[in-house]
Amino acid sequence: MNTTVDLAIDLPARGSRQVGRDLHLQLRAAIVGGRLRAGLRLPSTRELAAGLGVSRNTVVNAYDLLLSEGYVRARGRGGTVVADFLSPALRRERPEAAPGRDPRLNSTWRAPTSLIPIGVRSNYRFDFSVGIPDWESFPVPVWRRLSARALRKASGTRPGYGEPQGQIALRDAIAGHISFARAIACTAEEIIVTAGAQQAFDLLARILVTPGQTTVAMEEPGYPPLRNVLTAAGAKVVSIPVDSEGLKVDRLPRNTKVICVTPSHQFPLGVHLSLARRTALLDFARTQGAVIIEDDYDGEFRYGGKPLDALKTLDRGEAVFYVGTFSKSLFPALRLGFVISPPWAKHALVAAKQLSDWHAPLVSQDILSTFIAEGQLARHVRKMRKLYSERREILHNALERFCGRHLRVVGIGAGLHLATHLTDSISAAALIEKAREAGIALDAIQRFGVAEGRPDGLVFGYGAIASHQIGDAVRRLSRLMK
């Protein structure tokens, strides 16, 4: 191994009789402590002597002593390398702590909720994964051009910290876009830029939840990452069932202080919150002093009919926190989202953002603000709305034609996925396993909830699968059902 390292040696003043002794002891401690790993090549005696400002003989004597003790090996022209001096028995003696069980951890994190699967997805031939937009249709050349412009701009300025709330240019662009796309009248001052919707949820949990006291209502089934954040914050999370009109508002406990909803396209069932339920929910928040977290992750993708007004549009009591993200309209790796906050909570949210990570990446904010200001986002959303609408229709027709005896489509024509209920005794879990063996990636409705006795069902995402693949995939699935 031809690596030289910064050994971070701290020696006494030159001329001290302890220089050689201290050099030997510090090198040995670094090897025994694992900072210098087995097989690592040490600097030559001449290099180390020059770097430390000591005589070469001092370093030669230290190396010779380590060699006699078995901590290093001499390889001639290969130099001096750290020896693998630990026996197998000593390696086995190193204690291994049980994951999440160490009492030094906060009790909330001793048995943490399972991590959300991330990383490279398996290479399925037919990918119905949920929440993945179509990357093949993304305007990469435009993004590359804007990236180069943003980097040139950044290179001409002194690098420093940005505003925790987000760059004003991006907040202005978001305010303009959201007023057009979702009929929400807001200003840049009401917007806090976040690292995607997930950080928005985390920040809201920090400022709204008192551990062990605050009751938070969530849709059942619902969005697991949001539930995980609330649980980690110490909230008392209660599950509220969803029917064809959305969240059952009359089932909310009177002591509920935070209500989390996906009103435009419920995740994962795909229904929308009816106008009567929206009015009832806003009335509940007003009379009970509660707040509403509105997750509008794919509200822009509505097919057939006018997009439904956001709850934030109807809110007159400053009770709604509107959470938006660019993970579905653009791409997940961008990690940019936002919260539209009531005025009374804005300062706390900005402070929580600063404590969390100070601010979102400045170059990414610059690129996105220009992308929106140039009309590229609106153009891309229009294009993708047409494409996703086509895929949804193909998928819906194929499911009815080939699998109609076994499942029933639920929900409205919106979003990036389609939900179904299995109508017979087929097990969703068993079917999904067979499908994956056949190269078809699917999700089960059960994965997104905690309640027992819920109908079995499947969720089909259509952002990552090409239109021409859908019919073949559904035919193969129908054969598995038989």
Image (cartoon, helix red, strand yellow):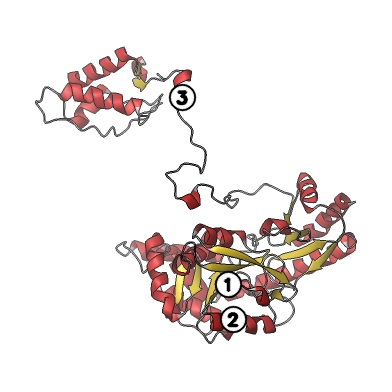
The location of residue 117, given as percent across then percent down, is 60, 50
Between the residue at mark 3 and the residue at mark 1, the CA separation in whole angstroms equals 50 Å
Front residue of 41/481: it is 481
Q: Is residue 32 above or below residue 341?
A: above
**Identity, as a three-letter code, of the amino acid under mark 2:** Phe
* Circles 2, 1 touching at the beta carbon (< 8 Å): yes
Residue located 43% across and 81% down the image:
343
Front residue of 14/254: it is 254
SS for callout 1: strand
Left or right placement of residue 414 versus residue 1 in this view? right
Query: According to the image, label 2 marks what residue?
Result: 284
First along the sequence among labels 3 and 1 = 3
SS for callout 3: loop
Q: Quadrant of the N terminus?
A: top left
Bin the neighbour count of mark 3 within 10 Å (Cα to Cα): few under 14, some 14-19, many 20 and up. Answer: few
SS for callout 2: helix
On residue 259, which mark appears? 1
Bin the neighbour count of mark 2 within 10 Å (Cα to Cα): few under 14, some 14-19, many 20 and up. Answer: many
